[in-house]
Amino acid sequence: GAVVSQHPSRVICKSGTSVKIECRSLDFQATTMFWYRQFPKQSLMLMATSNEGSKATYEQGVEKDKFLINHASLTLSTLTVTSAHPEDSSFYICGGGANEQFFGPGTRLTVL
Amino acid sequence: GQNIDQPTEMTATEGAIVQINCTYQTSGFNGLFWYQQHAGEAPTFLSYNVLDGLEEKGRFSSFLSRSKGYSYLLLKELQMKDSASYLCAVSAHRGSTLGRLYFGRGTQLTVWP
């Protein structure tokens, strides 16, 4: 299957700082990438759809000014959590592919 | 929205067969996925059904009935390492966006020796 990498795998930051998460498609070109968030014992919730060369589409209730998405190339999408707060602590996962979606290994964000 | 329902928990013994059911209500159906997720890890793709019927892949099989909005994942010859959460996800069109997945809450399977 397709390979998606994600970096960093784990990050701990202080409240108020910004954190950038990178998602790369290693063996396919991704015009669209999806960013999910998963809280403990919960399922994946789609946050936004990242579109190469255009603005991201955000799900209802997700603040676009807080979760900045950039998809500047066909192999890289980034999610920046701005002014992070403890309630933003979660497991962030990116996904991409054609009909079959493959996921990156995830980023565990802990905001102190 | 999309309604995807699957049992919260299931248990089985090593070597047994277990069937995890998933029902869904959706518009713009574009396929159904099953993923396996171990604690603290990202989901791993297991299967994809877009047409009715059974897809077999080794110890795992997945079935889809679009008219009934129903799917199941069948796991045979269970092994301890199969203990994980199994996520049912429906792909649905939304406007011009293809491939967007809606996830169920996941079924936590525990395999006992």
Image (tube, coloured by chain):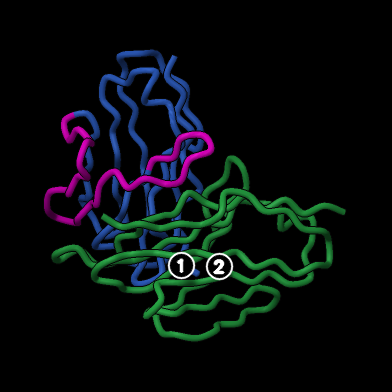
| Mark 2 neighbour class, 10 Å CA radius: few under 14, some 14 to 19, many 20 or more | some
Query: Could you tell me residue A94's position as x and y percent?
Result: 38, 49
Main SS of the magenta part reads loop
> Viewed as shown, does residue B51 lie left or right of B63?
left
Q: Amino acid at mark 2?
A: Leu
Asked if the stretch drawn in magenta spans residue B54, the answer is: no
| Pointer 2 chain | B
Marked residue nearer the N-terminal end (1 or 2): 1
- Shown in blue, the chain is A
> Where's residue A51, x and y in %?
19, 55
> Which residue is label 2 attached to?
B46
SS at circle 2: strand
Relative placement, left or right, of A33 versus A25 is left
Quarter of the C terminus of chain A within the rendering = top left
Q: Which residues are magenta?
A: A37-65
Residue hosting label 1: B33
Up the image or down, B1 lies above or below B77; here it is: above
Residue at image position (45%, 57%) is B5
In space, the residues marked 1 and 2 are separated at their CA atoms by 7 Å
Asked if marks 1 and 2 touch (Cβ < 8 Å), the reply is yes
Report which quarter residue B29 is drawn in.
Answer: bottom left
Circle 1: is it few (<14), some (14-19), or many (20+) Cα within 10 Å?
many
Question: Which is more toward the observer, A29 or A51?
Answer: A51
On screen, A63 above or below A25?
above
Q: Residue at x 77, y 65 (%)?
A: B78
Q: Position of residue A99 (x, y in %)?
A: 35, 72
Residue B32: give x, y in percent of width and height.
42, 70
Looking at the picture, which amino acid does disc 1 mark? Phe
Q: Which chain is green?
A: B
Task: Report whether B66 appears left or right of A105.
Answer: left
